[in-house]
Amino acid sequence: MEAEARPVIEALGLQLDLEAGDPALPHRHFTGRWGKRGETELMLTVNGRDPRHRCDSIGTDPATLSAYVTLKNFKPELCISAGTAGGWASRGAKIGDIFLSRSPLRFHDRRIPIPEFEAYGRGEYPSQDVTALADKLKFKLGNVSTGNSLNHTAEDLEMMVQFESDVKEMEAAAIARVAMLLGTPFFAVKAITDLVDSTHATQEQFLANLDLASERLSTAVIQLLRELAQITT
Ligand code: ADE
């Protein structure tokens, strides 16, 4: 979402690049440089506004499309899915916590009860092992699961309990699949806006905490870039 990306774009001084990507799509690409000598090129892609419904293009379809365009054109050394997510108080999460992804990333709303399709439905796409980064930056590590709804059905919850999900969001597994197909190393960083096991409605928590979580996310992304620059330069 625009609101999730804005603090990162501003903090990194990224510029809108109208030449990157496909002008037919609502995605927006922002580019910039990072590091003492600007040695690291950055590209941040937001899925943009849906032209029909005039709201942010949330969910797995826009995520797949924008991940493909970004990874194919930009050919990055690393792809990070950064955004907000729901967490579980019963699993130790608090509003504003930062989680990095454990492998694998799964879908919790794709139920295909035919033996050869069950695992395909769950996805199970790889994340880089970011344990050392999480330890260094005091972020949490969590099992990430993706679906196309902000709230959840009883069946979704059953799957998330089975996955021992820590992080519930709407894009990461789809992006992880594209990254796997194109051979791009991948992980997710997610800031918690709402607690799935709270008695308060998800949308109310989400809207109340979006700005705080987006600020935390922006700080976390910059901390990650700083650490990654030390590893790769
Ligand atoms: N993004 C933020 N909170 C979420 C939730 N509970 N489910 C899906 N996506 C989210």
Image (cartoon, rainbow, N blue to C red):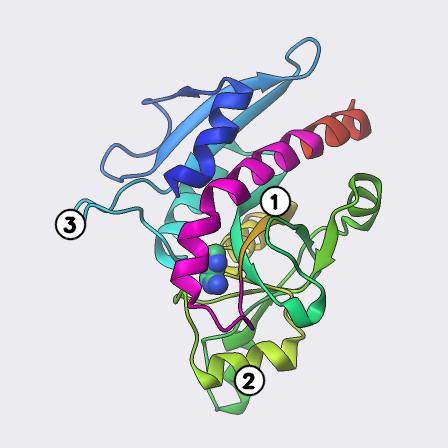
Separation of marks 2 and 1 at Cα, in angstroms: 31 Å
Q: Amino acid at mark 3?
A: Arg
Please state which of the two labelled residues, at mark 2 or mark 3, is closer to the viewer.
Answer: 2
Task: Identify the magenta region.
Answer: 195-223
In the rendered structure, are the residues bearing label 2 and label 3 in contact, judged by CB atoms less than 8 Å apart?
A: no
Looking at the figure, which quarter contains the C terminus? top right
Q: Residues within 10 Å of mark 3 (few under 14, many from 20)?
A: few
Residue at 70% over, 34% down: 224
Image x and y of residue 100, in percent: 68, 51
Tell me, for residue 204, which label it has, or none: none
Image x and y of residue 129, in percent: 77, 52
Q: Earlier in the sequence, mark 2 or mark 1?
A: 2
Locate residue 34: give its quadrant: top right
Residue at 40% over, 30% down: 29
Separation of marks 2 and 3 at Cα, in angstroms: 33 Å
Vertically, is 129 above or below 117? above
Describe the element under mark 2 as helix, strand or loop.
helix
Describe the element under mark 1 as helix, strand or loop.
loop
The residue under label 2 is 158
Describe the element under mark 3 as helix, strand or loop.
loop
Q: Earlier in the sequence, mark 2 or mark 3?
A: 3
